[in-house]
Image (spheres, grey):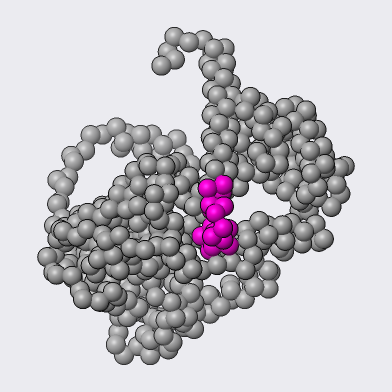
Amino acid sequence: MFENVSADSLVEEIGSSARAENVACARRLAAVAELYRRRVVMVEDGQGRERWRIDPWDAVVAEVAAAQSSTSGAADSLVHVATCLHLRLPRVAAVFAAGTIDYRTVRLVVSRTLLAIEPEVLAAIDAELAETISAWSGLSRYRTQLAVDRLVERHDPEARRRTESRARSRHVDIRHDRHGSYLTGTLFGTDGTLLDQRLTAMARAVCDNDPRTPEQRRADALGALAAGRVTLPCACGSSECPRAESGSGASVVVHVVTEAATLQMAHPSDVHGERPEDDTCEVITSRERFAEVLRSAATPRATPARTLIPNPTASGLVLGGSTLSAGVLADLIARGLAEVKRVIHPRDAPPEQHYRPSTALADFVRCRDLTCRFPNCDHPADRCDLDHTIPYDAGGPTHASNLKALCRKHHLLKTFWCGPSGWRDVQLADGTVIWTSPSGRTYRTTPGSKLLIPSLCTPTGRLNVTARQGDSRWRGVMMPTRSRTRAQDRRSRVMAERRH
């Protein structure tokens, strides 16, 4: 693309592209703010929707998340920045629209000015920021925050947001990927010491024949604590080992979905102990060894024939987490920490006669869907409601082709924000759901098992059912409500922080 372009022109292209990106982001935030304004005006009809548990804000967040293919959390943050920027800081919004500042700076400014509540003070802060913020482009995030705080403090000392102390910033984060889960965080010193000593004590309590390394036992001990156990079960495999049982039942249930063939081909010894191939790093300290490694790498080697395994699925998926290898699953089963439960595909079974699905049908739907079926929502299916796509009271059967997993938030959104100005959905026999947003855009979501276990997505039978039109005039009285509106809650938090 840029083969014949000079370095100066490349730098100019980088700068102009960054400004164009800022302009495009500012335009997106302006569209989000205008959409929220229209949706709020649309529901001011005396039905009290501003006190609904799923209020106009949630409805806009769902529509924005679907439109930009993001999670609800990311869309919620974007709607917050967009509305605060255009309702509270219109002059800063104009500077952003010109492309001279980026979204990171805008988000910081919105956050650090949130406690300013008097219209005259807020207007003065907005005007001074618009005049000076363009000159802050070379400042780091920390120095930009200091500049905003000093400006806010000159206009309203109580509106400056104080930096949290180290103690109040304690947290624990768990990040998942296909290789495992990663735990990071900050604790009180006493809590960290207690946890460290408890893990060590649990790791040392197993017998000498346990095949795991001390580090592996400490990691497994943390999982045992999370399951409500007080001891770590030994993995020696002997039925006579007095430490094979944990002595306490699990208080938390974690669901893992996998194919039966995966468990048949796995062995628990795959994840214990150490093997030569685990240490793949070598520190070379001599020229002779370095030359030997180079010669070995340059020598052509015969490529071994690939062995085709009968089942390509060699892992299971934790609902709400990451994948587990077949060896880990086999180890959990061998230690008695996991129970194998077969999920039956209903195929062409007729609809059930009751509103609430049977345990077998509910298990199948959750294993097929894995997550909430609303666009871009990854809420685990085992913590979701089971929704009738065609409502049961409108003639919708209790059948796999008419059931799907929806988290409580999106279930309420679909149920109560219905009609021409709400979300509509159509479900196909293979579990695919086609959503239509209030603005008429369509989104297609497929079951989460489509890639992991495609056999669960085999069509379950077509339904020749047409939804009956019911009287929904009183539907809103069943919506859970808030004690205060979202705006009242936000003002209460702002005033509490100002007093603090």
Q: Position of residue 348 (x, y in %)?
A: 12, 65
The residue lying at 64 percent from left, 73 percent from top is 191
**Does residue 53 belong to the magenta stretch?**
yes
Q: Residue furthest left?
A: 348
The segment highlighted magenta reads 40-56
In the displayed structure, 162 sits above or below 53; it is above
* Quarter occupied by residue 255: bottom left
Residue 311: x and y in percent read 17, 58
Inspect the magenta stretch and tell me whether residue 50 lies in it: yes
Quadrant of res 93: top right
Q: Left or right? Give the position of 500 relative to 310.
A: right
Q: Residue at x 54, y 54 (%)?
A: 45
Instruction: Please provide percent x and percent y for residue 263.
Output: 22, 68
Residue 276 point in image, percent of width and height: 34, 57
Residue 181: quarter of image: bottom left
105 vs 117, left or right, is left
Residue 466 shows in the view: yes
